[in-house]
Amino acid sequence: MNLTPVQIVAELDRYIIGQEEAKKCVAVALRNRYRRQKLSAELRDEVLPKNIIMIGPTGVGKTEIARRLARLVGAPFLKVEATRFTEVGYVGRDVESMIRELVENAVRMVKIEKRAEVEAKAAKLAEKRLLDLIAPRDGKNKGNRSPWDMIFGGMPAGSEGPAVEEETAAERRSILKEKLKRQELEDMMVEVEVEESAGPGIILGGMGLEELGMNLQDMLGNMLPRRTRKRLVTVAEARRILTGQEADKLLDMDAISALAVQRVEQDGIIFLDEIDKIADRASGHGPDVSREGVQRDILPIVEGTTVQTKYGPVKTDHILFIAAGAFHVAKPSDLIPELQGRFPLRVELQSLNRDDFQRILTEPRHSLLRQYTALLEVEGLDLKFTADAIAEIADIAYTVNTQGENIGARRLHTILEKVLQDLLFRAPEVEESQVVIDATYVRQQLGEIMQHTDLQSYIL
């Protein structure tokens, strides 16, 4: 959280090409959160986040900027499409569901962190339970053959010692315990009990949390008895299952819930996509009533309200909302004035040009070219892209975007898949250890397509 705006932009540059203004805008918003935490308690409550509207065509990095920003600082994050709230009747899903989902994400994040803290202790407890499964303390085993028989064939190691029957259960456990620690029994099969969900969703007829208005599913889930079933798994799998069970027992869910709610209230980020789809206020009747109704339902959430969740009440005053939309038809001014006022910062993202496409193919940490290279390395192929091939792919992507629907960087996925489709299909049988992709190869693979003027009909 103490990253400077320059450092935040530098981190975003590792994954996202261009869009400097948008990066600066979100970097300042994130740094202001850190500054706010240093203020006095009285003043801290008065400093509200400055929500942002990102304006730009699809595929230019709007969602990725918000997602990487949240991942950078470990903040609870949720991406939601505004249109989901208009899908049924005048108003679709309950708009408060976005807060409940954000809290669920935060609980999962905190739970993973706390699990890591107790993992070592849970592993020791799981090993004890695993030993009890393999060699019970009473020396009896429910199976036809004892674990000792399965491991040593009826005689202890060395075969010169006393018969198995003469060995005590404690001695057997001691030997098996050491083998477990050295992971020498990982392929041995054992029977473990795993918990089955009671399936309250089926009892409720598939009704969701929003339709019920309260968490009846969890209530019934706690009332119904826990059902378990036995699974025959390897020792390695049993170790994982038992470690998870022991870790859950060590976790304080009340503390986890409280910390998750606190993180949502102070650090939560909601990315509200496709806000332009609910911005039309032209006629005042028909579907426009639904769109304006959704805006008015979203308004109190963005303004600051308290939403009831199964983890307790959550205040939305300091959650950062980043809205985004292409705004090809509607304009930000088509939003109701009250909602416009809650998004004081507006930043326009630029369409991608040829140079941007070339940089996207090569510069990001996990670029598309690196992904395809790694995939084909699995087949033993060393894939190389020449500079002219990269330039040709970028040029085709730019051309198709300008002549048809502009879908930004997503165009590269389709073009690369078409260029490499034959190689991906034949890779297991290719005898060459290295394959070089140059501009000629790209044109050969896209030859028939490039002859047609309407490229949009052939490259989605």
Image (cartoon, grey):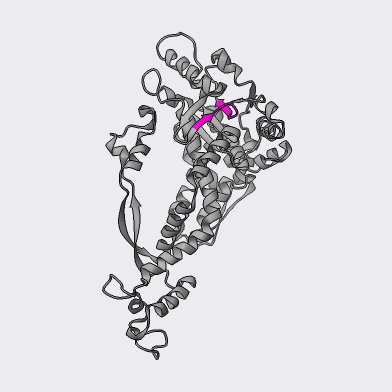
Q: Could you tell me residue 71's position as x and y percent?
A: 59, 41
Q: Nearer the viewer, residue 61 or 454?
A: 61
Quarter of the image for residue 179 reads bottom left
User: In the rendered image of this protein, does residue 319 appear above or below residue 156?
Assistant: above
Of the 4 image quadrants, the one containing the N terminus is top right
As drawn, 227 above or below 290: below
**What is the magenta segment's predominant secondary structure?**
strand
Q: Position of residue 354 (x, y in %)?
A: 63, 35
Residue pictured at 50% horizontal, 39% vertical: 105
Q: Does the magenta stretch include residue 322?
A: yes
Looking at the image, the residue that sits furthest to the bottom is 160
Position of residue 191 measured from the top left corner of the image (x, y, whole percent): 33, 64
Res. 332 visible in picture: no
Q: What stretch is highlighted in magenta?
A: 313-324
Judge by depth and name the residue closer to the eye, 421 or 24: 24
Q: Nearer the viewer, residue 268 or 443?
A: 268
Name the residue: 27% across, 37% down: 203
Residue displayed at 45% across by 71% down? 180
Residue 153 in magenta stretch: no
Q: Position of residue 200 (x, y in %)?
A: 31, 39
Q: Residue furthest left?
A: 144
Q: In this view, does 240 lie to the left or right of 338?
A: left
Q: Can residue 166 be seen in this view?
A: yes
Q: Could you tell me which residue is drawn at 44 percent across and 62 percent down?
A: 126
